[in-house]
Image (cartoon, grey):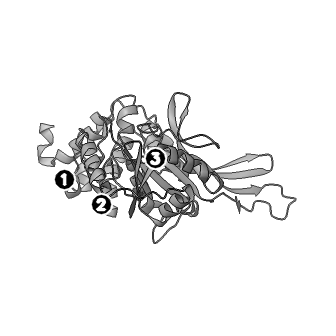
Amino acid sequence: MRHLFVSRENFADGVAALAGSYRVYGPVQERFHHVMGLLPPGVMPEMSVANTRLSAKGVVYPPSEKMFRACLDPAREDHHVYKEIEKDFSPRAVFGIRPCDARAYTLVAPNFDNAEYKDPWWTKGYGATTFVGHSCNDPRSTCFCTSTGGGPCDTTGLDILLTDHEDGFLTQVLTEKGEALALAAGWTTEAGADAEAALSDARREAEGKISSVINTDKIGKKTILALYDAPFWADAAFACINCGTCTYLCPTCWCFDIQDETHGTDCVRLRNWDSCMFPLFTLHGSGHNPRPEKTGRVRQRFMHKLKYYGDRYGNGVHCTGCGRCVIHCPVNIDIRRIASLMNEYEPDNACSL
């Protein structure tokens, strides 16, 4: 790792210089909120945005993705034969991604890239992407990244991390992909000898502003059945309207559905984001639905985030503390409260809850 200093002017010049070799993404305003979008030439990422409404997961894992195409015309020799649709996996760079969203990719990776199974589109997209993060100098009151294993200046999952400093950015170049991007952007000015100390001060100050926590330290020691049968799930799910906002905004939710759409003799197979909050998500072909009631679906969401994931991967909880679900849930279901219920629950004390 090495430290550079990039002035605001050099930052803009560098982003512009990447246009010929990278597809550049960054925070941009879309109507009433910001999204992580593909930047047209000449448009700069809005680095002052606290965080985008939707996370950056859509850059690698699009909300709707065409996978295969088939012709349904029986007169053709290759009718009903699915053929993979060619995709663009040329280099892309994501600017302004916050550390919580970058770390989310590392929590999602075991689902798409493991010893038994590799999702070809996710792995190629992830491999083609260089993540240029931006430290959170002013975390929101709903951010709780420091209690999920991350932090406002965490470098996990990043290739470069920019930290505001004077009239530019202290720039940590973390990986070979980061080195290649810095070279292509023309960022070569070494930071001064005090860079490490300045970064430590910035990290300490930012972490000191985190006022929210999630308590999960006891959940791993409890049995699945004890938590599954806990009496608080009906109350926790009472207000839920199954809108799916929490899952679509979450940087670590990965549920999807695969559908065929036909028009005339053309058939396209798509992968679309789905949500465990929706009644149809678990509906079997037989008509059986193991989670027909919303209480079961809400329980599934939090058990997966806070219990199943940790038990399976031994990698903490399936949450980075970005706080989106806390901010945007229309009925104020708060993962921090649910985690506390799960963390403190003891079957023998059920009556006291």
CA distance separating discs 2 and 3: 45 Å
Q: Is residue 84 visible?
A: yes
Q: Where residue 238 sits in the image (x, y, percent)?
A: 33, 31
Q: Is residue 288 visible?
A: no
For the point 38% across and 50% down, the residue is 99
Q: Amino acid at mark 1?
A: Lys
Q: Look at the numbered discs 1 and 2 and tell me whether their residues touch, using CB distance below 8 Å.
A: no
Q: Where residue 154 sits in the image (x, y, percent)?
A: 33, 53
Q: Amino acid at mark 3?
A: Ser
Q: Secondary structure at mark 3?
A: strand
For the point 29% across and 34% down, the residue is 141
Please give the residue where the numbered disc 3 appears in the rendered image: 7
Q: Nearer the viewer, residue 316 or 81?
A: 316
The answer to which image quadrant residue 41 occupies is top right
For the point 48% across and 50% down, the residue is 255
Please give the residue where the numbered disc 1 appears in the rendered image: 218
Please give the residue where the numbered disc 2 appears in the rendered image: 311
Q: Considering only vertical position in the picture, is 350 above or below 81?
A: above
CA distance separating discs 3 and 1: 45 Å
N-terminal of the two: label 1 or label 2? 1
Q: Secondary structure at mark 2?
A: helix
Q: Is residue 297 left or right of residue 279?
A: left
- Mark 2 vs mark 3, foreground winner is 3
Q: Is residue 107 left or right of residue 62?
A: left
Q: Nearer the viewer, residue 4 or 127?
A: 4
CA distance separating discs 1 and 2: 12 Å
Q: Nearer the viewer, residue 75 or 306?
A: 306
Q: Look at the numbered discs 3 and 1 and tell me whether their residues touch, using CB distance below 8 Å.
A: no
How busy is the neighbourhood of tag 1: few (under 14 within 10 Å), some, or many (20 plus)? few
